[in-house]
Image: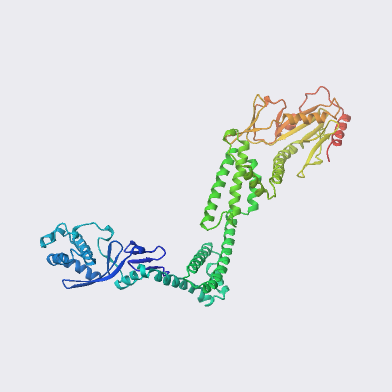
């Protein structure tokens, strides 16, 4: 234990707090004004007490056997005790208060009525019978050694305290440096020896390296403080400080690497966490987003707490990036919730600066505009991926069509490189449209718009499309306008007698559709698509095989490749 905190069995000196604890009770060193020894001789019992004065007298003894014998004699020789009390009743010096405490303890231990002593010449109003002093010090206290107690108390008297403190603190530093000098030499020239020892002792234990870090940090701060107070020689301190700084920075590096490894194992790589949120945020409903938001805030708070406990700033490596993952991730989640929340009055305010910071961080860009461009493209790709899954189901269904039906091949490329159908007629409108499936037959052109919805789809009498899933409702875009645009482009270059038959195909066989009668375009599930096409007969006149071929050629000639 450092010399600034010296412990005995019943006494403890703490120089940093400038207090002495005697049998569990603290005394402020700054309030000490008197320390001494006093010998007692009563009915053949001899015992020495140490004492201090800090506004009240505190008495200590170490010879338990003699102390107990003294108390017994006081209880048994009431006349002799009253004579002793009368001897010091008016001087109110150290002896007066010692005998007062001894009287109080005797009466308590042997249940003696203290007023018994009045019969032997003491007044009932005597100070001996009052309790007007600090309750803490009603009786003498046990210590380990009277001489040690006296020496220790004398050393911290106001006139001696500064010198004692300097000696103790200087010695403490030397004691703690012994751990280093034993390994690195008296001049601390062999730094590597100590670091090798740390590697051997600490291994890959983060707790052990943190303990080493705390120890070095505490010693550096203490040495710096003592040097500023000129308690420690500046020249000698400089060499030690350089050594401690070198070791401290090495240990900090090891702690950072182990923290990084621990974070990586627990949370995963930063890049993976960014991609995970970017890929999932647009697929979640409001309730799922709310749960995810709470999870992100909990992790942000947990990591922030760990960083503070480690004595690190929240933006410092390695915690900084992980804190930002959850801090800024919760901003993106909250922004998404604002965009889909029907009750706009309850939207959470997010400053544009904070939203821009989140976008730049999550999309690894220089500007929010660039990040938003990437986000838009990624959402398009995700929507296409979901749509492609549905289109693949429809592709499989269409394989079972009669061979007289001609399926238009996908020869265009979308902006993420997937094969698709883009058709454009610049003479009609300078804009291309993307089609999911086109089937050419004598009945006309089947224009199939595929939707890969999950849950329950409700179409109300006003044309609102609502998806219900997991006790949540989400408004969907009515595809009617899109389909009518597709029809107009096709009709702008196809023969006039060629009918365009539009179909909305729900690719997910488990989806539930309610209110399909409110949609002017038939809604068919993929498992019934072939049945619907092959049995469709709502045509006034079929087109010839030659016209079928002309329609196919016209479509390919207007396809963007």
Query: Residue 109 at what x, y percent from top left?
Result: 20, 61
Q: Where, quadrant-wise, is the C terminus in this rendering?
A: top right
Q: Is residue 314 above or below residue 533?
A: below
The residue sitting at the bottom extreme is 186
- Res. 113 in view: no
Q: Which residue is situated farthest in the top direction here? A: 540
Q: In which quarter of the image is residue 551?
A: top right
- Residue 167 left/right relative to 302: left
Query: Residue 321: horizontal and vertical position, in percent?
Result: 61, 53
- Horizontal and vertical percent position of residue 156: 36, 68
Q: Which colour scheme is used?
A: rainbow
Tell me which corner region of the image, top left, top right, bottom left or bottom right, holds residue 508: top right
Name above or below for residue 185 compared with residue 343.
below
How many numbered tags mark residues here? 0
Residue closest to the eye, 302 or 90? 90
**On the rendered image, what quadrant is the N terminus found in?**
bottom left
Q: Residue drawn 56% across and 68% down?
A: 245
Q: Is residue 209 above or below residue 372?
A: below
Q: In this view, does 61 lie to the left or right of 226?
A: left
The answer to whether residue 422 is visible is: yes
Which residue is nearer to you in this view: 325 or 412?
A: 325
Residue at (63% x, 44% y) in the render: 353
Image-based side of 464 in relation to 222, left or right: right
The quadrant holding residue 88 is bottom left
Q: Where is residue 520 in the image (x, y as percent from the top left)?
A: 72, 25
């Amino acid at each position: 234990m450092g010399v600034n905190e010296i412990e005995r069995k019943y006494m403890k000196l703490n120089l940093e707090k400038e207090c002495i604890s005697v049998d569990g009770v603290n005394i402020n060193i700054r309030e000490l004004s008197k320390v001494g020894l006093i010998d007692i001789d009563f009915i053949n019992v001899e015992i020495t007490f140490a004492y201090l004065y800090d506004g009240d007298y505190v008495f200590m003894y170490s010879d338990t056997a003699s102390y107990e014998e003294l108390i017994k004699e006081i209880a048994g020789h009431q006349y002799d005790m009253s004579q002793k009390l009368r001897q010091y009743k008016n001087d109110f010096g150290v002896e007066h208060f010692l005998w007062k405490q001894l009287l109080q303890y005797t009466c308590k231990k042997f249940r003696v009525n203290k007023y018994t002593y009045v019969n032997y010449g003491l007044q009932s109003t005597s100070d001996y019978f009052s309790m007007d002093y600090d309750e803490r010090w009603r009786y003498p206290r046990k210590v380990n050694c009277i001489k040690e107690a006296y020496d220790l108390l004398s050393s911290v008297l106001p006139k001696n305290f500064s010198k004692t403190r300097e000696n103790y603190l200087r010695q403490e530093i030397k004691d703690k440096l012994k751990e280093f000098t034993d390994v690195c030499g008296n001049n601390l020239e062999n730094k590597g020896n100590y670091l090798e020892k740390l590697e051997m002792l600490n291994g890959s234990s983060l707790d052990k390296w943190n303990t080493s870090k705390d120890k070095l940090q505490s010693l550096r701060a203490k040495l710096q403080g003592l040097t500023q107070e000129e308690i420690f020689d500046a020249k000698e301190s400089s060499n030690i400080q350089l050594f401690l700084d070198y070791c401290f920075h090495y240990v900090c590096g090891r702690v950072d690497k182990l923290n990084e490894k621990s974070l990586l194992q627990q949370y995963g790589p930063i890049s993976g966490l960014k991609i995970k949120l970017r890929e999932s945020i647009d697929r979640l409903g409001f309730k799922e987003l709310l749960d995810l938001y709470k999870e992100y805030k909990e992790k942000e708070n947990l990591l922030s707490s760990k960083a503070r406990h480690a004595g690190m700033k929240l933006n410092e490596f390695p915690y900084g990036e992980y804190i930002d993952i959850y801090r800024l991730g919760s901003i993106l989640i909250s922004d998404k919730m604002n965009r889909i929340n029907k009750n706009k009055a309850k939207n959470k305010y997010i400053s544009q600066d904070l939203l821009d910071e989140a976008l730049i961080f999550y999309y690894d860009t220089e500007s929010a505009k660039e990040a938003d461009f990437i986000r838009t493209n990624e959402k398009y790709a995700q929507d296409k991926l979901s749509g492609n899954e549905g289109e693949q189901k429809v592709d499989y269904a269409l394989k079972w069509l009669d061979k007289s039906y001609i399926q238009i091949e996908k020869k265009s490329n979308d902006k993420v490189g997937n094969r698709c159908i883009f058709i454009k007629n610049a003479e009609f409108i300078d804009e291309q449209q993307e089609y999911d499936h086109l089937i050419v037959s004598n009945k006309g052109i089947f224009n199939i718009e595929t939707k890969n919805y999950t849950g329950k789809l409700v179409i109300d009498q006003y044309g609102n499309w609502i998806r219900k899933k997991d006790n949540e409702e989400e408004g969907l875009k009515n595809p009617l306008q899109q389909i009518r645009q597709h029809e107009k482009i096709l009709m702008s270059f196809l023969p006039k007698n060629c009918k365009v038959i539009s179909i909305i195909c729900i690719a997910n066989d488990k989806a539930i559709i309610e209110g399909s009668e409110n949609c002017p375009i038939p809604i068919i599930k993929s498992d019934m698509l072939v049945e619907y096409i092959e049995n469709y007969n709502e045509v006034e006149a079929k087109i010839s095989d030659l016209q079928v071929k002309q329609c196919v050629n016209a479509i390919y000639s207007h396809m963007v490749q």
